Image: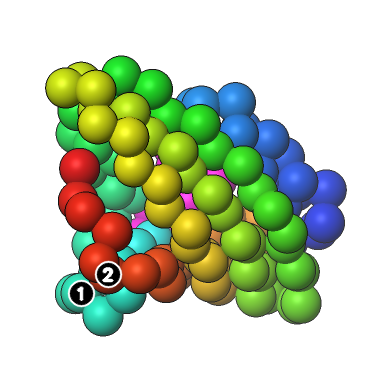
Amino acid sequence: MPTRARVDEFIAVVESGDHAGAIERYYAEDASMQENTAPPRVGRDALVAFERGILAKMKQVDSKAIASVVEGDRVMIHWIFDMTTLSGKNRRFDEVAVQEWRGDKILRERFFYDPGTPPA
């Protein structure tokens, strides 16, 4: 079960812009991520590679945690991601991440956001 301090560390790393590094340091080797109802991506290495691919399409990403709740092995974080693509298009994702932790690592994460938000 994660401590509040561990979750706050994770949030700080994401807010600093080190998204791929956050996955490398805070996710279990067999972790999964799921976008809304899409099939989950599985395996930390695959999650890092996917994240780097998304970031490569961005000129800038600003990440802000609006609120977070830690309840045993469950964590919920309300995120706002403001992104600027390489072509200059701005996008905002207002998202809630629901996480299941195993010890001090994230095991499963599912993102809930408006599916009408244009993809990167």
Q: Disc 1 on helix, strand or loop?
A: loop
**Which three-letter amino acid code belongs to the residue tagged 1?**
Ala
Give the magenta range: 23-30
- Say which quarter of the image contains residue 52: top left
Q: Mark 1 points at which residue?
A: 38
> How many other residues sit within 10 Å of disc 2, few (<14), some (14-19) or many (≥20)?
few
x and y percentages locating residue 83 in the rendered image: 37, 34
Vertical relation: 96 (above or below) 44 = below
Residue 107 visible (yes or no)? no
At 69% from the left edge and 53% from the top edge, which residue is drawn? 66
- Say which quarter of the image contains residue 104: bottom right
Q: Is residue 112 left or right of residue 88?
A: right
Is 28 within the magenta? yes
At 60% from the left edge and 26% from the top edge, which residue is drawn? 16
Q: Mark 2 points at which residue?
A: 115
> How many other residues sit within 10 Å of disc 1, few (<14), some (14-19) or many (≥20)?
few
Q: Is residue 6 left or right of residue 101?
A: right
Is 3 within the magenta? no
